[in-house]
Image: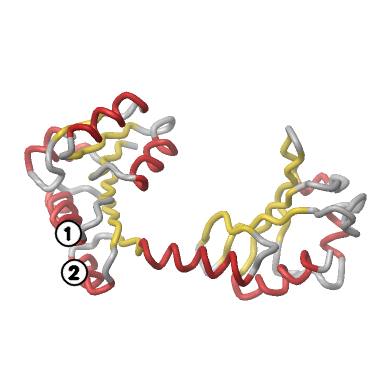
Amino acid sequence: MYIVIAGINILSKRLVERLEARHDVVVIEQDEDKCKRLYSSSGATVINKSPSTISALEDAGITDADVLISTMKKDNENMVVCSLAKKYGVPKVISRMEDDEYFDAFEIIDAQTIGHTDLLLSEFLSAVEHPYLVKLANLSEDREILKASVRKDSHLVESTVDRVKRNDSFPDSFMITTVLKPGETLDAEKDPILEEGDELILVGPSEDKEILDQFFQKQ
């Protein structure tokens, strides 16, 4: 895909790191020093202009873009960039959003918003309320991808994935997909034997996460 990103900050840098190996990425930023640092550390094309100007978007090849992501801290600036991208016919427009008051405005121009504060709050709550699980990602239908570890002296040591799933305390709504061992990744369907330090990747509904956390707490 051809992806245009507006703004250079911690969020956009991480996006570039994840995306540039598989997609064509162009980043627009007004600050010249930020542009130079990103250009020297990545393979992305960097344009040193204000992202909210027509000339910058045209230089970025906005008419060819499959996705535009606006990551700037000011919601009004993101609104301008997203509105222009929509006028140029970009199919998918995504914006960072700091203030919920802008939600309706973004919705009117058909831009998907990601609330930065909401994401942070969700991660902190998850870490506090489910200390034995690490959330890796959100999926559709209120499902999550989680990671749990086999601790020292756990009764799960020398058990198998199948025996874990058949344990009465393990929630049936969760699926174990992968077992991560030092230096190797194993398909859980092959029913590997678990050892201390192994990590399990699980997929299931958010509503049953408490049960899963208790299972690994008592392991």
Q: Residue at x 36, y 61 (%)?
A: 116
Q: Is residue 42 above or below residue 67?
A: above
Q: Amino acid at mark 1?
A: Met
Which residue position holds label 2? 105
For the N terminus, the image quarter is top left
Q: Secondary structure at mark 1?
A: helix
Circle 2 packing at 10 Å, graded few (<14), some (14-19), many (20+), is few
Measured as percent of width and height from the top left, residue 154 is found at 87, 57
Which comes sooner in the sequence, label 2 or label 1? 1
2 and 1 marks in contact (CB < 8 Å): yes
Q: Position of residue 30 (x, y in %)?
A: 15, 39
Q: 129 or 180: which is nearer to us?
A: 129
Q: How far apart are the two marked residues, 2 and 1, measured between alpha carbons?
A: 8 Å
Q: Nearer the viewer, residue 130 or 177?
A: 130
At 77% across and 67% down in the image, what residue appears?
Answer: 217
Which residue shows up at 26% across the image and 46% down it? 68
Is 103 left, or right, of 136 in this rendering? left
Q: In the displayed image of the protein, which residue is found farthest to the front?
A: 33
Residue 202: percent from the left, percent from the top? Answer: 68, 57
Task: Please give the name of the residue rendered at 29% of the width and 45% of the height, measured from the top-left corner.
Answer: 67
Residue 112 position, x and y percent, is: 30, 60
Q: Quadrant of the C terminus?
A: bottom right
Q: Is residue 65 left or right of residue 24?
A: left
Local SS, label 2: helix
* Horizontal side of residue 80 vs 161, given as left or right: left
Q: Dot 1, how many residues are within 10 Å of its Cα: few (below 14), some (14-19), or many (20+)?
A: many
Q: Disc 2 residue type?
A: Ala
Residue corresponding to mark 1 = 79
